[in-house]
Image: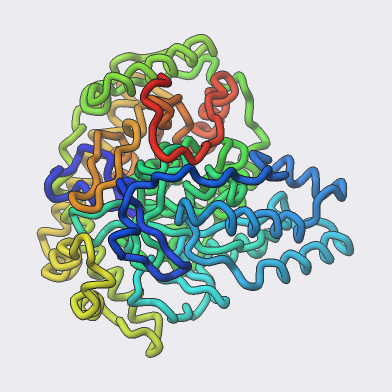
Amino acid sequence: MAHAPDDERDPHRLSRRDFVGAALAIGALTTVRGRVDLSSSALLPHRAAPAPISPFELEELTLADLRAGLQSGRFTSRSITEGYLARIEEVDPRLHSVIETNPDALAIADQLDEERASKGERSPMHGIPVLVKDNIATADRMMSTAGSLALQGVTPPRDAFVVKQLRDAGAVILGKANLSEWANFRSSHSSSGWSARGGQCRNPYALDRTPSGSSSGSAAATAANLCPVAVGTETDGSIVSPSAACSLVGIKPTVGLVSRNGIVPIAHSQDTAGPIGRTVSDAAILLSAMAGYDPHDPYTSAGRSHVVADYIARLDPDALRGARIGVPRPHYYGYSDATDELMQNAIDVMKTQGAVIVDPAPIATAGKFSEPEFQVLLYEFKTDLNLFLASLGPSSPVRSLGDLIAFNEKNTEREMPYFGQDLLLEAQKKGSLRDPEYTKALTACQTLSRAKGIDATMAKYKLDALVAPTHGPPWLIDLVNGDCANGGSSSLAAVSGYPSITVPAGYVFGLPVGISFIGRSWSEESLIRFAYAYEQASKLRHPPALAPTVNLSAH
């Protein structure tokens, strides 16, 4: 759930974590569901023009559109589910965004159609298909592997709490999305979006570019209309970065608003699940269905009084009027001229909407929590993953981090054909969460990112939100050297555990760039309102064309 566009970290050691994302390969991998083709021909550039994609009745339909169609009888849950399954079958061989589809999806859709007819709808999500990331447990006939062959065939003991929430809301779990294996916390030289089970996920805006990670499949599939919405997870950037790279809306909630129970962990102090959609409204509807108190995740105790039953009820295109928006230029701007130009355009839009722009509004501690964050992740990953793997029971071939390392070494050709597992090895060397090194690092992270970071800046300048580029344009996939991160802002909200939401801000040579709205803890409702007002005033998103590469003559 880490990602890595943010330049908070040492670029030589941390640039591959799940913080920023992935890259598309000059010749991307081809897969047959669950099996990676590592032959040399699979790595050659695409030369022939791909076959045109069939017209799709559900193209770019919002959740409101689908709900209206269900209520009017134009659609059934079965017809919608069939439509997305057919779309996956046709389009996903180019993207590798879906690891597997749910063999029971149509039967579930039929049941929900019968229930709608006899009892009415459960929620706005009733009968709506949703893809979930493959590190989120589903106790059904699908696997939940974090993209690793080590967990192939293992059945989780129960649904993740988030999946239970979605099922209770009447959603159809459509399938499992590809991801950066182990949420990109395996190697410091990885290509985000690559997993041994799913191969290299690609960006639908240019198939040789990264979809970013680690929720790469969730984002790529949503952007390409293989599903209406999807669930991602984040430790640092893994919701907002792929969402930005695929011209989507992604919400990284305050840690504790959404339960992590049943999700393969990296670090309990930063991990969260969150929604990915094509519009702010869609992401907000999905967040309403996901959030809630879970007695098995103690962090949700603090969040139970902050859950909003309907995040779209107070959406207002005029919400930016009078809002004080801060621009933390030092450290979070300046790494890409083209990105800065888009950000200035976005700031100008907010000004026309009546926002009060405070520029600059510097974060005094920006760039100072990279090393303590890395130490926290190493310690918590070892502890949390050991607990998770032990909970899977005797059917799992790996019951500890040590077992996982040994599995990868035994299966090097399949699991480590391009990059290794140095982050797993570093984590294995760490002690317990009682070690002074860990407690010192955790205190530093929370102090520098919260009290002396976001809280201090927002109090000093009397701000309602901060805005910064989520990261620059997505880079080329490089399976040899790994990701090439180009700056970003994800660590600010990730390390603090505070919320952020990314919205499309425009394109550079057709490559998407997003803008992040960041705020204090539990400020999701305000950030969603600001993001919605900006989205409605700018309306920049357009669907992808699955182009083989970037058209450098069109700028």
Q: In this view, does 445 lie above or below 453?
A: below
Res 263 quadrant in image: bottom left
Can residue 297 be seen by looking at this rendering?
A: no
Residue at horizontal 47 percent and vertical 47 percent from the top: 219
Q: In this view, does 219 lie to the left or right of 459?
A: right
Res 115 quadrant in image: bottom right
Residue sitting farthest toward the bottom: 394
Q: In which quarter of the image is the C terminus?
A: top left
Residue sitting farthest toward the front: 48
Q: How many marks?
A: 0
Q: In this view, does 219 lie above or below 415?
A: above
Residue at horizontal 37 percent and vertical 48 percent from the top: 238
Q: In this view, does 53 lie above or below 364?
A: below
Q: In this view, does 247 lie to the left or right of 539?
A: left
Q: In this view, does 333 lie to the left or right of 37?
A: left
Q: Is residue 521 above or below residue 459?
A: below
Residue 453 place in picture, x, y as percent? 26, 33
Residue 97 place in picture, x, y as percent? 47, 55
Taking depth in this image into account, of 426 and 55 the one nearest to the observer is 55
Residue at horizontal 25 percent and vertical 53 percent from the top: 479
Can residue 433 be seen by looking at this rendering?
A: yes
Q: What colouring style does the render use?
A: rainbow
Q: Quadrant of the N terminus?
A: bottom left
Res 515 quadrant in image: top left
Residue 2 place in picture, x, y as percent? 31, 52
Residue at horizontal 32 percent and vertical 63 percent from the top: 182
Residue 390 place in picture, x, y as percent? 33, 81
